Amino acid sequence: MSKFISVEELYQYFLNSGQGICTDTRKLEKGALFFALKGANFNANEFAQKAIDAGCSFAVIDEEKYAINSKMLLVENVLTTLQQLANYHRRQFNIPVLAITGSNGKTTNKELINAVLSKKYNVLATVGNLNNHIGVPLTLLNLNHKHEFAIIEMGANHQGEIAALCNMAEPDFGLITNIGKAHLEGFGGEEGVKKGKSELYKYLNSKNGKVFVNGDDEVLYELAVENDKITYGVKRMYDVIGRDFSTDETVSLKFTTGYREKDFGKLTLINTQIFGLYNFVNCLAAACVGNYFKVEDDLIKEALENYQPNMNRSQMVKTKRNTIILDAYNANPHSMKAAIENFSKHKAEQKLLLLGDMFELGEYSAEEHTKIIELLKGNKLENALLVGNEFFKTEDNTFKKFKTTDECKTYLKAMAVSGNTILIKGSRSMKMETLQEVL
């Protein structure tokens, strides 16, 4: 039987490869280490030799029958080894590591905080939403000695996942954006979500780390009662105190600290390019983190004002015929409610909502989709199209429904919608952003 290679030995191969890691045979890099991960429908051990032939230096495998030459590095479990290697690598760096999780706004917070901290530090931040049990180790393995700070986004849909990611990334600081009705099916209801997300607070408390907490969020504040906290909000004398000066279209704010000027009339206004009043608290969080790490106020302002939303999040897109508020990266009851309530206050003569199904709600799905319909009616938003099987199955027929996004697209194309301000929102797999093509 072949001998398993240790993580310490593998680390030397990793360093010699120039820290190159590949997990996808479609994106192979010359000289990199190929990790033969397994999925429900694939076994990358089968492609290990292909990776070597394509120029990878070595392949990490966990099935001995594929260990056909010295280029194959055998381990007990490729995924576990990848995670252990990432943790080993992380321990070589004595820099602040900030972990971000939450039901909504993880990526937006990560991007805003990255924009602020990057004004003063060389920051490694999660790319896109590589925030799971594979994405987090891949992010950590990108750390190099030029980095002065790391921001690690952590996603989860089951209890225990955040704890596992914390053990891997070993953060010194943490921020939970909020706790809402997301991944109810996997977490086992709202209390399960609360328990799962708060694993970050528990980890940091056990390691004497610090947490950034929205003091106005009673749930978060209560969960962080035993933590060493840096607080932000609008209602009390927090470490960072903000005030919302937002217009109808984009977020504007001012902030100060517990020991500085309290007359908001004398403070500098920050005008962002971010749509959605619910993003005010995300901007304030970024200001709080920046302030704690001694980023100057003018640089915080510059970072927030220059940040441009992307990846279908809180974007305002103007087409030849309509104005589109694109928030179609993902959706759950909490974020859907916030988007609808914000849109109801928007000053536009003609409004249209295109709402897609919310996924991973399990037994709560019918109830939560019905609640969204009631919310539309309660806010007197009469012009809405509902897309997806979950919305289609609801008993309420107040609004026109479509089983698929393509069916809705065909309808919109025929209608030649013009002169509308349109909110597009739905879960990622619905691909609601494709509706822009006919608007």
Image (cartoon, rainbow, N blue to C red):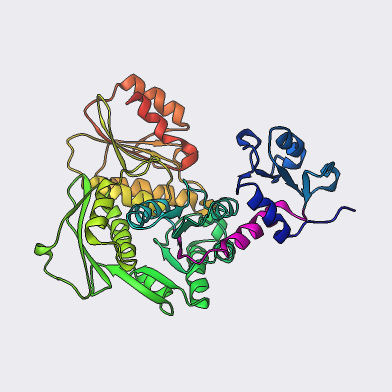
The correct choice, above or below, for 180 with respect to 107 in the image is below
- Number of numbered discs overlaid on the protein picture: 0
Residue 118, given in percent of the width and then of the height, sits at 36, 54
Residue 177, given in percent of the width and then of the height, sits at 39, 61
Q: Is residue 292 visible?
A: yes
The correct choice, above or below, for 373 with respect to 211 in the image is above
Residue 305 versus residue 311: which sits nearer the camera? Answer: 305
The residues colored magenta run: 75-102
Q: Is residue 43 visible?
A: no
Which quadrant of the structure image shows residue 346?
A: top left
| Lateral position of residue 403 relative to residue 321, left or right | right
Residue found farthest to the top:
414
Give the quadrant of the C terminus.
top left
Residue beneath the point at 90% across and 53% down:
1
Q: Is residue 420 magenta?
A: no
Residue beneath the point at 70% across and 42% down:
57
Which quadrant of the structure image shows residue 324?
A: top left
Residue 249 versus residue 139: which sits nearer the camera? Answer: 139
The correct choice, above or below, for 347 with respect to 117 in the image is above
Residue found farthest to the bottom:
226
The correct choice, above or below, for 369 with respect to 349 in the image is below
Residue beneath the point at 29% across and 65% down:
291
Residue 29, given in percent of the width and then of the height, sits at 62, 37
Residue 265, given in percent of the width and then of the height, sits at 9, 63
Residue found farthest to the left:
265
| Lateral position of residue 44 relative to residue 273, left or right | right
Q: Is residue 85 magenta?
A: yes
Residue beneath the point at 48% across and 57% down:
152
